[in-house]
Image (spheres, grey):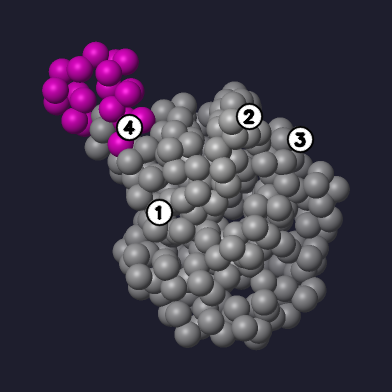
Amino acid sequence: MPLIPDGRVLYAQAFREHFAAPAFNVCNLEMAQGAVEAAEAEQAPIILQTYPGDLAHGGAPLAALLRTLAEGSSAPVALHLDHGEGLQMIAGRLRDGYSSVMFDGSHLDPDENIRQTRQLAEVAHAFSASLEAEIGLFGGDHGSVVFTDPEEAERFVSESGADTLAVSVGSEHRQESRLDLERLEDISGRTGHPMVLHGGSGIHPDDVEAAVGMGVVKINIGHAISVAMTEGAKEALNSGLDHYAMLKVMRGKVRDKAVEKIRLMGATDAAGPVPA
Ligand SMILES: [Zn+2]
């Protein structure tokens, strides 16, 4: 099954079928292979996503690598730009064949965030791709937390043209968290729109399941698979393994963690029957 060309198709399916697609932040071959192997084993659609820091690390070769892996996968794989910073970065990834991009205007005042999001949504749609926007702040290594205001979310969805909305309801980048499920339900009820959670690695499993039932279609997983990969490297080094064996252990640790997250989000078998 090839690369998912348009993220909107995946998000519509997830919204309809009540699962969330895990979006794994990957910056090298082993992380990406581990995530794709997990998707194939679970017959689940997944997203490989790159944060600007990942792209600073891997550049154009990383984007090309992810596209090649997605195109060769037996499970559906979308490519997504995480925390995109403006037109140049977003248009660059759309030209690389990404299915979905995020514009992070969360630091702007609401009117300016809506104005820029609307422009960039048009750009994404011209490439037949999906645009994710953010209101509220997720904190962790990105500064302080600001919860998403449900009324503001309602206005944002009606005026911005964003396909999915990242909402801050308790999860934090790199932190353990419990969600404010009442707030999430309020946002869901007012907007009726597919939502995204960041800081997904540390969200309590019960809250992940509840959130998926409320219209969350994408949950970002970065920290958990980074930790899995580095644990694999440490184990391999302590065991005196050679470099090929070490990379294999790293990939396997990422795969196991990715399988766990796919199952938690209800995405197993959402890819449909395995093609003959
Ligand atoms: Zn984030």
Q: Are marks 3 and 4 in contact (CB under 8 Å)?
A: no
Q: Nearer the viewer, mark 3 or mark 1?
A: 1
Q: Residue furthest front?
A: 276
Q: Are marks 2 and 3 in contact (CB under 8 Å)?
A: no
Residue at image position (73%, 80%) is 155
The answer to which of marks 4 and 1 sits earlier in the sequence is 4
The answer to which of marks 3 and 4 sits earlier in the sequence is 3
Give the residue pinned by disc 3. Answer: 95
Residue 235 forms part of the magenta stretch: yes
Give the residue pinned by disc 4. Answer: 252
In the shown orientation, is residue 125 left or right of residue 16? Answer: right
Q: CA distance from mark 2 to mark 1?
A: 23 Å
Mark 4 Cβ inside 8 Å of ligand 1: no
- State the image coordinates of residue 147 (x, y, percent, origin top left): 51, 77
Along the viewing direction, whichever of 8 and 150 lies nearer the viewer: 8
Residues shaded magenta? 234-253
Tag 2 secondary structure: helix
The quadrant in which residue 151 appears is bottom right
Residue at image position (51%, 38%) is 54
Q: Are marks 4 and 2 in contact (CB under 8 Å)?
A: no
Name the kind of residue labelled 4 in the image: Gly
Q: CA distance from mark 4 to mark 2?
A: 21 Å
Name the kind of residue labelled 1 in the image: Arg
Mark 3 Cβ inside 8 Å of ligand 1: no
Q: Is residue 172 visible?
A: yes
Q: Residue furthest left?
A: 239
| Main SS of residues in magenta | helix
Give the residue pinned by disc 2. Answer: 71
Tag 4 secondary structure: helix
Q: CA distance from mark 3 to mark 4?
A: 31 Å
| Label 1 Cα crowd, 10 Å radius (few <14 / some 14-19 / many 20+) | some
Give the residue pinned by disc 1. Answer: 263
